[in-house]
Image (cartoon, grey):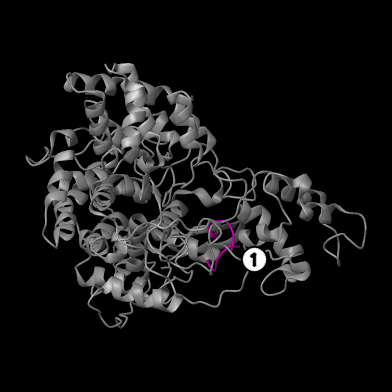
Amino acid sequence: MLSPRLAAIGAVAIFIPLADAQPPRSTKVDFSHDVVPILKTHCAKCHTNGTYKGSLSLDTRESLLKSKAAAPGKSAESELLKRITSTDPDIRMPAKGDPLAEKEIRVLKTWIDEGLAWEPGFTFKARTYVASLKPRRPTLPPASPRYDHPIDRIIYAYFAKQQVHPSPPLDDSAFARRVYLDLIGLLPAPSELDSFLSDKSPDKRAKLVQRLLADNRAYTDHWLTFWNDLLRNDYKGTGYIDGGRQQITAWLYKSLLENKSYDKFARELINPARGAEGFAKGIEWRGQVNASQIIELQFAQNVGQVFFGANLKCASCHDSFIDNWKLVDSYGLAAVIADKPLPMYRCDKPTGKTAGPKFLFPELGTIDPALPKSKRLERLAALATNSDNGRFTRTIANRIWHRLMGRGIVYPVDIMANQPWSQDLLDYLATYLTDNNYDLKKLIEHIATSAAYRAHSVPEPRESTGDDYVFRGPELKRLTAEQFVDTIWMLTGAAPAKPVAKADIPPFPSTTPAERRFVRASLVEADMLMRSLGRPNREQVVTTRPDELTTLEALDLANGQILTNTIARGAANILKANPKSSADELTTLLFKRALCRAATAGELAAAHSLLGSKPTPESLADLLWTIVMLPEFQLVR
């Protein structure tokens, strides 16, 4: 029989990606700068955008894998490498023109060996979709007795068109677990779950959503993580010691606590309010830096990515290879905060030109270069949040949908020029936000009260990432690092004593159950467990975290000292609080707290054999460990 520790490793192993899944996060070869130019020069004419000689399509990573011309991590076995290195004129590719240079071959070989990294959402296909800028108010499909929520009216008309059978609704226990984790990042306390399950009112799910969003402290503690990632805010790291970087924690926490309207929220970040300067300022890197990483261009990249879903990183060095943004776009936005005319560089070489202030969407208005910087920023903030700027509201609506439903309406969330799977839904949510005074809680509530949100999650085939994607329902989500740690702390009573975040944190409401009165992971510095589980260092904007568990993370969960110690302390705490409880009673308690359901007869028997007639801290720790390693625990279903 496997030991609990080995069983835990086995449970975690199912999350490790298959060989043809997305590659590890860090690669030495840069796809956009190193690989795309080679493929465009030598391969695109015959193998992209409708021309697929030899049945080889390089349009997307998925189409390349489907052709079996390249095996991730195995360049020696890849037909692509064999063809570009062959000396046989009947086999060598490209068939016409000069062969690839040795340097180019080395780049492609390394790219394959490192896992075939691919810029999310990139395709060699010519773009035919043009994203509109102005808001659009779609006509809602007719309501039906079953689906009268506006979101459902759009989605179920979409399902009918796509011939998709709707996923069945979650039961009350599963819904409670999902909505608690999504809205406040914690599991329901047993008393809260019992109260919800015993409620017979037909609108109890809507009331639960409203009640959770009204818990301002819990909401803020949870969504602080989302915004810390997005706004590059952390409690220590590069630039904080020498003053080249500033926290915005106090401003951000207060803004979330008060549910500041999103348009005002954005204006105070772009044209910084007191305490919000750290986002716009960027990091003053020590020593010599690449021209694309000067303070002004960091400002352009951060503002463009966060508020408009525009990836300007490539376009800060040269005209982008992966979308339509140009060097002049990045420099124009950067020049808004420049103290003097901003010299332009292309791939670190001076162009001899200077950039003046320019908005990314000039059809909305211009920025007078004669204005002082403070007035230029004020003008930029006004243009960004202009009621005619539909990109602003669509971008945040897409991010919120992604956070709640597991995937954005536009994929990926930072290429908002890509075609959404439902233009009507994206436009509806964007105008709904505007109609409700840019109230993000209202938007979250609106999504979470739809039948679409209440449906069972549907695992989506990994290759469905391109234009062929069809929405079938909410997708499985991994617990974030903070959610995982918070749930462990809630189960074990092993949270830290004090927060690190410097913010005016209010006391817990009197209605907060005792189990939920603890310092949250979002309010403390990241430890090695949180880092392992995907909490970023936040030197750059982070809009999505990896959704695959790596081998290293699996091993850290199974044998890491931090989790080992936490669970050991927690088991002792649980036994101390329940000294007379039997093995079955302890098992029932843990299942209810961790999984929001009762243990089955088989699970009770297995737990009893593990705990014995007299549970000890060691045996209870093994049971607790086994439960938290279950996919059912680690996923938001």
Q: Main secondary structure of the magenta part?
A: loop
The secondary element bearing badge 1 is classed as loop
Find residue 118 and report its horizontal and vertical position in percent: 60, 55
- Taking the spot 38% from the left edge, 41% from the top edge, the residue there is 634
Q: Report if residue 25 is visible in the image.
A: yes
Residue 573 counted in the magenta span: no
On screen, residue 611 above or below 261: above
Q: Residue 156 lies in what quarter of the image?
A: bottom left
Looking at the rendering, the stretch of residues picked out in magenta corresponds to 315-325
Q: Is 150 situated above or below 294?
A: below
Q: Name which residue lies at 32% across and 81% down.
A: 138
Residue 322 forms part of the magenta stretch: yes
Residue 347 visible in this rendered orientation of the protein: no
Give how far across and how far down residue 527 sits, in percent: 38, 29
Q: Amino acid at mark 1?
A: Asp
Q: What residue did someone put label 1 on?
A: 59
